[in-house]
Amino acid sequence: MEASLEANLEQLVRRHAELREALAGTRLTGSDFAKLSKEYSELSSIVDGIDALRRARDEASSLADLAQSGEDAELRALAEEELHALRERLPALEPLSRAGDFKRHQGLPTLVHPPRAQIVE
């Protein structure tokens, strides 16, 4: 995957974590809480997809290593078979192919906390 796309995906994952932390705090006004909750909800399915994609890539890497090892022919054949099946599923896991909200979330600021004036003391 392109480096800039990977950076954007990582930014979404960080934003999701920041939102989770902000929502766990008690210093938000009601309107800020609602706004951040909505954004968190919208990002959740995208981040779930990113996590699934990353797990599948890690699995594909491990299977490729097994498939190229010359130690056990049966194990190598099984790894090649599983790797082929996984590679067929990978395109469906690509966030851009199924997450219409992805483009809307590109370029999000990395800080989620509202300005001090909006924080309830």
Image (cartoon, grey):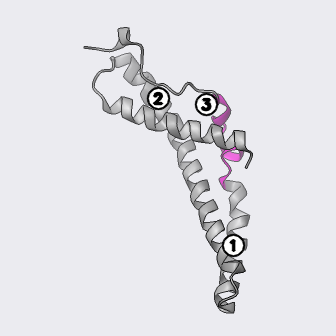
Q: Residue 38 carries which label?
A: 2
Q: Mark 1: few, some, or many residues within 10 Å (few <14, many ≥20)? A: some
**What percent of the width, then of the height, locates residue 59?**
60, 67
Q: Residue 114 carries which label?
A: none
Q: Which amino acid does label 1 sit on?
A: Ala
Query: Which sits earlier in the primary sequence, circle 1 or circle 2?
Result: 2
From the viewer's perspective, is residue 83 above or below residue 19? Answer: below
The residue located at (62%, 41%) in the rendering is 9
Foreground tag (3 vs 2): 3
Of 70 and 98, nearer the camera is 70
Q: How many angstroms separate mark 1 from mark 2 (CA)?
A: 40 Å
- Residue 105 is marked as 3
Residue type at numbered disc 3: His
Task: Name the residue: 58% across, 41% down.
Answer: 10
Q: Name the residue under label 1.
A: 64
Reply above or below: 107 against 93: above
- Look at the picture and state if 82 lies above or below 20: below
Residue occupying image coordinates x 37% and y 12%: 116
Q: Is residue 103 magenta?
A: yes
Q: Identify the element where label 2 is drawn.
A: helix
Q: Which of marks 3 and 2 is nearer the N terminus?
A: 2
Q: Is residue 41 in sight in this rendering?
A: no
Asked where in the image residue 89 lies, by quadrant, the reply is bottom right
Q: Give the mark toward the camera: 1 or 3.
A: 1
- The residue range painted magenta reads 93-106
Residue 58's spot in the image, x, y percent? 60, 63
Residue 69 included in the magenta stretch of the image: no
Q: What residue type is labelled 2?
A: Lys
